[in-house]
Image: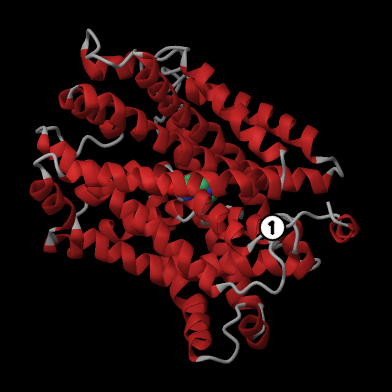
């Protein structure tokens, strides 16, 4: 640590590109690779894509900017940042919602990431070198109905803790600097290969041909907005925390633009990787959550020997993308507790990591009705796993995002806002301001009301 850092007592990113890659690592995750593709397929293909792009530009971008503005300005954690900017006001609750959401999302995200790690392991060690005796579907369902996923969930949490323990620059920044380019290369290789399998035309038609009816369906708009939130890691102060390690001189609009464009490219190229392969082997494109764990292994099985290599790369891609997202969720909680209880990074990270692992156990054991805790239901007949997902994705994230947008849009003065956004007096600044004051709250409220109803 340099003298300056010791004096400030707070870590910072080493480089601007390091920050952008870390934020991109948070954004690119399980949400891009399978959620985006099957949602796009089910919700009208290119029609969904157009609405999704609008949602990203007019709602995703402004909220990402708000999170960056709050973090860079306050240079503190999710909760304290609000106290610093608005002392004595209740806005810190937005940060509190973020920390709580971080705990819950990571608790089940690590479970799914554990499944991808288990598949990676099976493709490396031979477990999936040939078709499982009962087929790929029962291979998957019997695996997640058992207690075995706990082991993989534990390994994912240990890896995530291992990165976060090393700190902002030596852990998070370094891991993302290695992982993100690697992910980009694997994704392009797999997408290119998928296009040679003979299903390119059908796959791309499925993903890109607009179903004009979809424009008339309000649910498609809401789904697109929800996906924009989840995919860009918005609403739980993850990006407030990351931008709080940014030197004050760094410009925000260009960083936000790069992250948003790259995250979207990742999602679209993931679709180009998945659907041509699915159609080449006559598999079902709308298998939903099972697409990655049942349909894709079926496809790899039909490719033959080379399918093993593809399987390894595919699950390596998923696991690495999931870990870089998990790291950002853990960092939100760790940064908060380190400051709150004046603890150092190592014990805080290990303690919080262990706690989140334990909170995730019920989710790991309730993925199917046959799982050990699969029979316990609440929150509208949902099991633990689905309740955790519902509570965070559909309630806490939109609520956090709404509060963040209202905080900046309605309580910051115009001059303050223009300065802190780096838009200064440009026309973009005024447009940005009005989008934030009017469009964003109305749109989020619409999603929020719908998902509760
Ligand atoms: N964006 C990640 C994905 O697409 C998930 C994620 C990471 C996230 N951090 C988040 C979602 C914070 C909401 C809030 O998989």
Element type at mark 1:
loop
Q: Position of residue 165 (x, y in %)?
A: 72, 37
Describe residue 84's horizontal placement relative to residue 431 as left or right. right
Relative to the observer, which residue lies in front, 128 or 416? 128
Whether the residue under disc 1 has CB within 8 Å of ligand 1: no
Residue 218 visible from this viewpoint: no
Describe residue 341's horizontal placement relative to residue 149 as left or right. right
* Residue 199 lies in quadrant: top left
Residue 171 visible from this viewpoint: yes
Residue linked to disc 1? 14
Q: Position of residue 344 (x, y in %)?
A: 83, 40
Relative to the observer, which residue lies in front, 153 or 78? 153
Residue at the image point whose x is 87% and y is 61% from the top: 4
Q: Position of residue 444 (x, y in %)?
A: 44, 63
* Residue 375 lies in quadrant: top left
Q: Position of residue 94 (x, y in %)?
A: 64, 57
Is the residue 385 above or below the residue 94 in the image?
A: above
Is the residue 412 above or below the residue 382 in the image?
A: below
């Amino acid at each position: 640590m340099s003298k300056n850092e010791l004096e400030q007592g707070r870590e910072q990113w080493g480089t601007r590109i390091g920050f952008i890659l870390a934020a991109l690592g948070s954004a690119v995750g399980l949400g891009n690779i399978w959620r985006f593709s099957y949602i796009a397929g089910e919700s009208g293909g290119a029609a969904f894509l157009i609405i999704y792009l609008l949602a990203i530009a007019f709602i995703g971008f402004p909220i990402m900017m708000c999170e960056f503005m709050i973090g860079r300005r306050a240079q503190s954690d999710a909760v304290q940042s609000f106290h610093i900017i608005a002392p004595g006001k209740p806005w810190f609750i937005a940060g509190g919602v973020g920390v709580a959401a971080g705990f819950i999302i990571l608790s089940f995200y690590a479970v799914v990431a554990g499944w991808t790690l288990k598949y990676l392991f099976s493709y490396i060690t031979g477990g999936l070198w040939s078709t499982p005796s009962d087929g790929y579907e029962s291979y998957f369902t019997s695996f997640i109905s058992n207690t075995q996923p706990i082991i993989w969930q534990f390994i994912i949490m240990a890896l995530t803790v291992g990165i976060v323990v090393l700190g902002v620059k030596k852990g998070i920044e370094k891991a993302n600097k290695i992982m993100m380019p690697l992910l980009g290369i694997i994704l392009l290789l797999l997408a290119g290969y998928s296009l040679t399998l003979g299903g390119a035309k059908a796959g791309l038609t499925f993903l890109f041909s607009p179903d004009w009816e979809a424009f008339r369906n309000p649910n498609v708009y809401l789904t697109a907005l929800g996906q924009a939130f989840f995919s860009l890691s918005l609403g739980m102060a993850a990006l407030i925390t990351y931008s709080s390690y940014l030197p004050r001189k760094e410009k925000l609009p260009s960083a936000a633009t790069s992250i948003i464009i790259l995250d979207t490219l990742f999602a679209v190229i993931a679709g180009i990787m998945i659907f041509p392969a699915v159609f080449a082997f006559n598999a079902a494109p709308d298998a939903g959550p099972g697409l990655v764990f049942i349909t894709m292994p079926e496809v790899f099985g039909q490719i033959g020997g080379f399918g093993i290599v593809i399987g390894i790369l595919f699950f390596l891609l998923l696991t690495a993308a999931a870990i870089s997202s998990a790291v950002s969720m853990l960092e939100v909680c760790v940064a908060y507790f380190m400051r709150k209880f004046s603890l150092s990074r190592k014990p805080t990270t290990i303690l919080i990591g262990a706690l989140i692992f334990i909170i995730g156990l019920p989710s790991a054991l309730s993925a199917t009705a046959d799982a050990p805790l699969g029979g316990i239901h609440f929150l509208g007949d949902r099991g633990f796993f689905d309740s955790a997902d519902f509570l965070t994705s559909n309630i806490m994230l939109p609520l956090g995002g709404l509060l963040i947008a209202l905080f900046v849009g309605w309580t910051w003065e115009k001059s303050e806002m223009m300065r802190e956004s780096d838009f200064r007096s440009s026309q973009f600044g005024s447009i940005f301001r009005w989008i934030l004051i009017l469009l964003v709250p109305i749109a989020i409220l619409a999603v929020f009301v719908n998902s509760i109803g």
